Image (cartoon, helix red, strand yellow):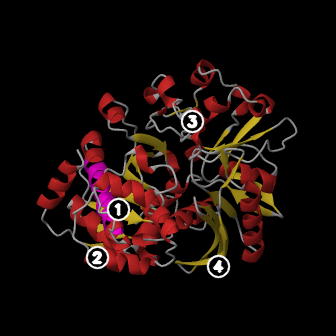
């Protein structure tokens, strides 16, 4: 007997609905609908076009046909505000909007409570930036993006744990809202709905259960890391690279805080101890500026470019905003004005591999873990050059895949809630190993060029 589930997976530039079919120990995926996620600037503010996204979700669910469950995941930190009638008060603001500039520096360090890396776009700083607005005054409920879409499907209000853990307002120890912190910051407690756990049934859409999954896309991706054992690092590679370890307990000491590591909630109460690295965003922006639709040619040209000739610190906030990315890279790396797109691409990928190296090694030092392998999942697993460079930079084997890790993790949590797959994370990961393609990249063994490159960027 087969079972079908629909995973709604929203990324920073696109969304899709993926149907997973479980039958006879096999798992097959079918992307039934893709749709654009195009932010809109209006009145000087950058917004998500949430109604367009919801339309894409509905279209995808209709194309999916009858399924046994629906789960929704998306990026973190952004939210919508509902008024007393349950109506949305305006389009959610994009995390790259400038409204939070300077806010984090005016707030006392929250690390010992939330365990989060201080990033200017964390939800707590967005709420503080909005606190004196009429919209905030009219608000009665805050819903993270997946919870907002689930509310429109089911009419039920709640906050899924893994995404709530990225707000900066969840207590990393109790795994519930930090009510004292919320009060100290002058935020209204009524805005924050009850916490849900992955596997909870939220409600129903046209008779189909809508299930809470790891609604932060990285939480779902980590479920589908095909690891055997615990001594592994992971890179969830897309617009961002989320680089870290899976732990049982948070790391909250000063060294961890100073190294900008974050303790986010994972499925089954795990801690995703990781660092947010800029990821493939600079390359995506350059491709947009160049009008380049085919990455294959760029990667072939990058392969021929001199290795580690030009590198930058991709963690520099300089590379966070959109616009003139190639120009900023040229200035920061000392690239010649006539540098080809292939050379710029090589600069980005070498720099990203350096950032992966730094995060993997520092996470191991801070958590007293010695990773034996790096699992690189997500869209970046298709990028053979990036995978090979990451293996060389870290000095560890890189196991690339699955590409569809986020959708897989979403589907596996739904299937587990329905009782058709084993209960433990280890068993879910074994199923991934058995059913998905994984490619192994061995490191070249010469660390000297990478040490020299790291020194050049001051790392």
Q: Quadrant of the C terminus?
A: top left
Query: Disc 3 designates what residue?
Result: 100
| Label 3 – label 2 distance at C-alpha | 38 Å
Q: Quadrant of residue 69?
A: bottom right
Tell me the SS state at disc 3: helix
Q: Earlier in the sequence, mark 1 or mark 3?
A: 3
Is 3 above or below relative to 405? below
Structural crowding at the residue carrying mark 2, measured as other residues with C-alpha within 10 Å and reported as few (<14), some (14–19) or many (≥20):
some
Residue at the top extreme, as displayed: 184
Residue placed most toward the observer, 321 or 406: 321
From the viewer's perspective, is 140 left or right of 350?
right
Number of residues whose C-alpha sits closer than 10 Å to that of mark 4, classed few (under 14), some (14–19) or many (20 or more):
few
Measuring from the top left, give residue 108's x and y in whole percent: 48, 22
Q: Could you say which is closer to the camera, residue 164 or residue 302? A: 302
Residue at mark 1 to residue at mark 4: CA–CA distance: 44 Å
The residue pinned by badge 4 equals 2
The residue at 65%/67% (across/down) is 36
Q: Reply above or below: 209 against 67.
A: above
Q: What are the residue bounds of the magenta stretch?
A: 345-361
Name the secondary structure under disc 4: loop
The residue located at (46%, 56%) in the rendering is 240
Q: Are marks 4 and 2 in contact (CB under 8 Å)?
A: no
Element type at mark 1? helix
Q: Is residue 107 visible?
A: no
The quadrant the N terminus occupies is bottom right
- Mark 1 sits on what residue? 348
In the depicted view, which residue is nearer to us: 122 or 116?
A: 122
Q: Reading the chain from its start, which is encountered first: label 1 or label 2?
A: 2
For marks 1 and 2, give the CA distance.
12 Å
Q: Residue furthest front?
A: 337
Disc number at residue 303?
2
């Amino acid at each position: 007997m087969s079972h079908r589930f629909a995973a709604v997976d929203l990324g920073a530039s696109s969304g899709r609905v993926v149907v997973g079919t479980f039958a006879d120990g096999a798992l097959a995926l079918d992307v039934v609908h893709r749709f654009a996620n195009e932010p809109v600037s209006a009145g000087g503010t950058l917004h998500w076009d949430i109604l367009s996204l919801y339309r894409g979700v509905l279209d995808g669910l209709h194309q999916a046909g009858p399924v046994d469950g629906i789960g929704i995941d998306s990026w973190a930190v952004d939210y919508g505000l509902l008024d007393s009638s349950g109506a949305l008060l305006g389009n959610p603001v994009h995390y790259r909007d400038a409204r939070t500039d300077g806010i984090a520096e005016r707030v006392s360090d929250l690390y010992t409570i939330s365990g989060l890396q201080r990033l200017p776009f964390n939800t707590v700083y967005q709420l503080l930036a909005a606190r004196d607005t009429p919209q905030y005054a009219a608000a009665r409920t805050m819903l993270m993006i997946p919870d907002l879409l689930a509310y429109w499907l089911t009419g039920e209000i709640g906050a899924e744990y893994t995404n709530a853990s990225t707000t900066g307002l969840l207590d990393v120890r109790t795994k519930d809202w930090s009510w004292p912190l919320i009060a100290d910051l002058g935020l209204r407690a009524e805005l924050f709905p009850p916490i849900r756990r992955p596997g909870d049934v939220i409600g129903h859409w046209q008779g189909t259960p809508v299930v809470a999954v790891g609604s932060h896309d990285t939480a779902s991706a980590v479920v589908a890391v095909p690891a055997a054992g615990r001594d592994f690092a992971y890179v969830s590679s897309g617009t961002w690279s989320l680089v870290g370890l899976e732990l049982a307990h948070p790391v909250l000491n000063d060294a961890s805080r100073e190294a900008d590591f974050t303790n986010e909630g994972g499925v089954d109460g795990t801690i995703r101890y990781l660092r947010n690295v800029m990821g493939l965003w600079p390359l995506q922006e350059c491709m947009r500026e160049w009008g380049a639709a085919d990455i294959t040619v760029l990667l072939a040209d990058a392969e021929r470019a001199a290795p580690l000739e030009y590198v930058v610190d991709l963690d520099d906030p300089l590379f966070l905003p959109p616009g003139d990315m190639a120009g900023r890279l040229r200035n920061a790396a000392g690239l010649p004005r006539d540098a080809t797109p292939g050379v710029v691409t090589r600069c980005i990928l070498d720099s990203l591999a350096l950032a992966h190296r730094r995060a993997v090694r520092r996470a191991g030092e801070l958590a007293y873990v010695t990773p034996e392998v790096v699992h690189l999942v997500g869209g970046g697993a298709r990028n053979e050059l990036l995978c090979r460079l990451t293996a060389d930079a870290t000095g560890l084997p890189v196991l690339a895949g699955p590409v569809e890790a986020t959708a897989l993790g979403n589907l596996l949590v739904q299937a587990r809630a329905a009782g058709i797959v084993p209960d433990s994370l280890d068993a879910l990961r074994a199923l991934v190993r058995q059913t998905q393609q994984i490619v192994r990249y061995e490191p070249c063994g010469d660390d000297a060029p990478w040490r020299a490159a790291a020194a050049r960027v001051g790392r």
